Image (cartoon, coloured by chain):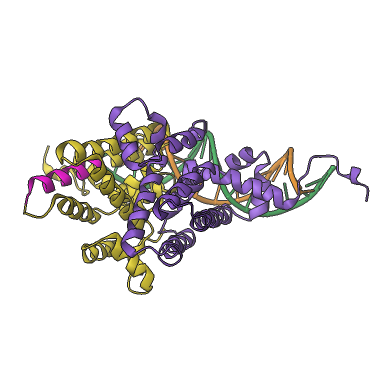
Chain colours: A yellow, B purple, C orange, D green
Amino acid sequence: MTETDVPIPRMKAHDRRELVIESATAVFGDYGYYGTTTDQIARAAGVSQPYVVRMFGTKEKLFVEVLERALVLLLGSFRRALANDDGQPLQRRLGLSYVGLLEHRGLLLSLMHAFVLGSDPVIGERARQGFLQVYEFLRTEAGMTSTEAGLFLAGGMLSNTMIGLRMTDMDSSDPIAHELLEACFPEKLEVVVELGDTYRPDPK
Amino acid sequence: MTETDVPIPRMKAHDRRELVIESATAVFGDYGYYGTTTDQIARAAGVSQPYVVRMFGTKEKLFVEVLERALVLLLGSFRRALANDDGQPLQRRLGLSYVGLLEHRGLLLSLMHAFVLGSDPVIGERARQGFLQVYEFLRTEAGMTSTEAGLFLAGGMLSNTMIGLRMTDMDSSDPIAHELLEACFPEKLEVVVELGDTYRPDPK
DNA sequence: GTCTATACCAAGATAGAC
DNA sequence: GTCTATCTTGGTATAGAC
């Protein structure tokens, strides 16, 4: 029962699990559910492929966990922005909070991939539910009107799309692209471009 | 050289090709690029799987064709709406035109899947280009300001997301869901729900 | 122009050792 | 708790007949 019984660097189950989910989020964000390999995820997390499957049972279950965690983080971030009234208008606080989520690599993109997979019986169901949850938050907790909430969501979906398109990578070159970016992220461009930088390297 | 040399129902190459692209659009719309099988497409088009590959070389090339055709149809539809001035405000004409594209099963969703695959060297490149093309249309031909164009695109991306989520399928049940749909498609709900109906059956 | 048969590979999952 | 080896399936692509 001495501690030296354990020579190889192991982690507590929970930590490894978190690590794998985080890596999975990043990869799923790039290639989507079907486009992502459990092996890619394993390599990103520095563990073996069978172990990834072992931990979550199936790739699908893992994706659902990623999706669920993304929603938790998203709503958590919104709630914090809501509580943290710094005098700025609500829309802006929430918007910045949203953009701040770019720090979590793949988080918003994994969500987006899920949103567009509504035909899938299990992923689609969870995705619908999650989207509604966000809408409900905006209406009930944030006190937006349905129109305001719709506009806010629309902006969010446009952001996600631009991130998915890796538009932030081609910034300064094309003047039209640059104008589009500015139109899409009013007053937040610098933040977005900076955070978007993290998205650069991803050799398959 | 008699016509009876050809007993089995063949089509002109061009027509078959069109048919396959259309079927592919529908399936890609449901499951995305990676999630779609060339065999699914083949069955949807009523031809053999190898023949699909034969016609387009690779699955990737086929997807790019689908993407390109979708953009052509989208811009065509917009140009028609622009030219067809019936007194309604431009935003509304374009919006209705956009929603009308739901008639082409999978068209908007295939676009959406492409948009979120920006990390892919070939698909991503084409997708970025296409998105910019649309933005440029709104700014130049439709004469929108950058803000107007941004808002319009945002609405479009939200629509796509709701379609992808199959939100229109759960209409009347949940009151919140219904409110969300109305907020998302102002004055167009009936059209959307009606056209969205076509999306129901899709057994994998 | 279109099919059948099939080669070939990649990916998810399982078994079992350490 | 984590790995190596491996089974199994399914999917893209090719060959070649009709």
Q: Nearer the viewer, residue A168 or A135?
A: A135
Left or right: residue B3 versus residue B136 is right
Q: Nearer the viewer, residue C18 or A73?
A: A73
Tell me which segment is drawn in magenta.
A70-85
In the image, farthest residue toward the front: B87
Q: Is residue A167 visible?
A: yes
Most frequent secondary structure within the magenta stretch: helix
Q: Image height check: is B194 above or below B94?
A: above
Spot occupied by residue A112 in the image (x, y as percentages of width and height): 35, 47
Left or right: residue B159 versus residue B9 is left
Q: Nearer the viewer, residue B120 or A179?
A: A179
Spot occupied by residue B106 in the image (x, y as percentages of width and height): 51, 44
Q: Is residue B81 magenta?
A: no
Q: Residue at x 41, y 47 (%)?
A: A37
Query: How many dots with numbers?
Result: 0
Left or right: residue A75 versus residue B65 is left
Q: Residue at x 38, y 35 (%)?
A: B167
Spot occupied by residue A171 in the image (x, y as percentages of width and height): 33, 70
Quarter of the picture holding the C terminus of chain A: bottom left
Q: Residue at x 67, y 50 (%)?
A: B17
Quarter of the picture holding the N terminus of chain A: top left
Q: Is residue A47 visible?
A: no
In the image, farthest residue toward the right: B2
Q: Residue at x 58, y 39 (%)?
A: B40
Spot occupied by residue D12 in the image (x, y as percentages of width and height): 58, 50
